Image: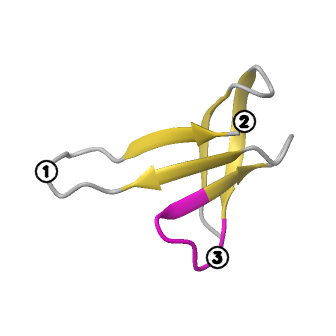
Amino acid sequence: MESLISWCADCGQHAVFDAVPDASPAEFLCRGCDAAAIVEYSPSVTAPSLSAVA
């Protein structure tokens, strides 16, 4: 399973987010509080955009 480390606004600290299988765009859930983070890949940007969703 793919994971990433990012700031979690709900936890108030950096946290590990685990990928949700078969989610499009890529969706990750915080291990600490289950907050969702959506990663949308853009062909014109070199780094993916990360958006937190409550």
Q: Is residue 22 above or below residue 35?
A: below
Labels 1 & 3 near each other (Cβ < 8 A): no
Residue drawn where x is 58% and y is 80% of the image? 22
Residue drawn where x is 58% and y is 60% of the image? 27
**Could you tell whether 52 is left or right of 46 in the image?**
right
Q: Quadrant of residue 54?
A: top right
- Tell me the amino acid under the disc marked 2: Ala
Q: Is residue 40 above or below residue 45?
A: below
Q: Which residue position holds label 3?
A: 21
Residue lying furthest left = 44
Q: Position of residue 12 (x, y in %)?
A: 76, 19
Q: Earlier in the sequence, mark 2 or mark 3?
A: 2
Which mark, residue 44? Answer: 1
10 Å crowding of disc 2: few (<14), some (14-19), many (20+): some
10 Å crowding of disc 1: few (<14), some (14-19), many (20+): few
Disc 2 to disc 3, C-alpha distance: 19 Å
Q: Position of residue 28 (x, y in %)?
A: 63, 55
Q: Quadrant of residue 2?
A: bottom right
Q: Which residue position holds label 2?
A: 15
Which mark, residue 29? Answer: none
Specify start and end residues of the magenta stretch as a single range. 20-27
Per the image, label 2 sits on a secondary structure element best described as: strand
